[in-house]
Amino acid sequence: MQISGGKVALYLGLIFGAGITAGAFGHMLYSTETVSAKAVPTNNNDDWRQRYVESMRTRLKMGDDQLKELNETLDETRVEYRLLRQRYKPEMEKIHQVQVDKIKKFLRAEQLSEFEKMEREREEKMRARESGPGV
């Protein structure tokens, strides 16, 4: 029994199509992000400070007097950072606003509303961070 050229072309086309489908499906599975049950670490400065102090205590074998001085130094530095941040905040906001205005000029109308939503989310995160414990 001889197979016609049309059937051979059809079979080759089906095999080729199956390969493309399998490749696309494999790529989709490979590039999809996995879900993790681990908690996402937050940018909490108190957590950072606890880890930092503990690391200093264990790695440098600091005594209680040294740990007291370390905590006092960190408290003083926190205040200085907050003052500096407040001092330069208006200038930083001006620079950011210029950036936002430039970006808005080249966005399409359908992109603009999503960009504005992204900016509101960024501002909320900044406010939450500023109202937190600080540096």
Image (tube, helix red, strand yellow):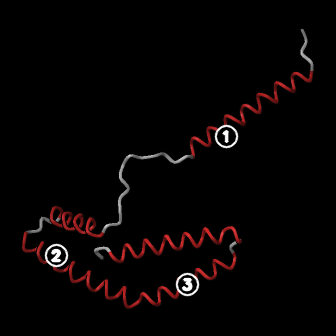
Q: Identify the disc placed on residue 32.
A: none
Q: Which residue is mark 3?
A: 97
Say what amino acid the circle numbered 2 marks: Leu
Q: Nearer the viewer, mark 3 or mark 1?
A: 3
Q: Which quadrant of the figure has residue 85? A: bottom left
Residue 40 image point, x, y percent = 38, 56
In this view of the protein, which residue sits in the foreground, 69 or 113?
113
Q: Which quadrant of the figure has residue 129? A: bottom left
How far is mark 2 from mark 1, CA to CA? 56 Å
Residue 35 image point, x, y percent = 46, 46
How far is mark 3 from mark 2, CA to CA? 38 Å
Q: Which residue is mark 1?
A: 24
Which element type, helix, strand or loop, lies under badge 2? helix
Q: Which residue is mark 2?
A: 70
Q: Dots 3 and 2: beta carbons under 8 Å?
A: no
Residue depicted at 58% across the width and 85% down the height: 98
Check disc 2: other Cα within 10 Å, few if <14, some if 14-19, many if 20+. Answer: some
Viewport quadrant of the N terminus: top right
Say what amino acid the circle numbered 3 marks: Gln
How far is mark 3 from mark 1, CA to CA? 42 Å
Q: Earlier in the sequence, mark 3 or mark 1?
A: 1
